Amino acid sequence: MISNYLKEYFKERKISQYEIEKKTGIARSKINLSLNGKRKLTAEELINIAIVFDIDLEKIKRLNNK
């Protein structure tokens, strides 16, 4: 699941939701809901996060197809 992958990714790198918000412009409330599986990220949000934090979109695509 994408939310679990992203949550682990940020946890391992000690990246806070505040930092995600500041670097992407996505509200912390949306980030929190998304990382906890209660809201899906939009395609635009996901691409934005991937670009800013250098996350491999192909890996996310594979996770989504499981």
Image (cartoon, rainbow, N blue to C red):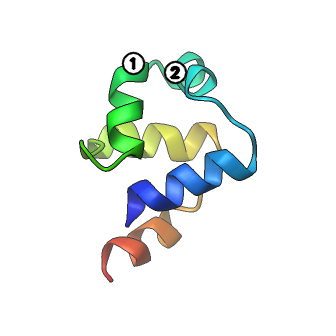
Q: Residue at horizontal 26%, vertical 42%? A: 42
Q: Are marks 2 and 1 in contact (CB under 8 Å)?
A: yes
In the rendered view, does 15 fall on the left or right side of 50? right
Q: Residues within 10 Å of mark 1 (few under 14, many from 20)?
A: few
Q: Position of residue 9 (x, y in %)?
A: 63, 54
In the rendered view, does 53 fall on the left or right side of 57? right
Residue 19 in sight from this viewpoint: yes
Farthest right residue?
Answer: 13
Q: Residue at horizontal 37%, vertical 45%? A: 36
Pick the quarter of the image with the N terminus.
bottom left
Q: Position of residue 2 (x, y in %)?
A: 40, 61
In the rendered view, does 49 fall on the left or right side of 26? right
In the picture of the structure, the residue carrying the numbered disc 1 is 27
In the picture of the structure, the residue carrying the numbered disc 2 is 21
Find residue 12 and name its label.
Answer: none
Which of marks 1 and 2 precedes in the sequence? 2
The answer to which quarter of the image holds residue 8 is bottom right
Q: Residue at horizontal 33%, vertical 83%? A: 66
The answer to which quarter of the image holds residue 65 is bottom left
Q: How many marks?
A: 2
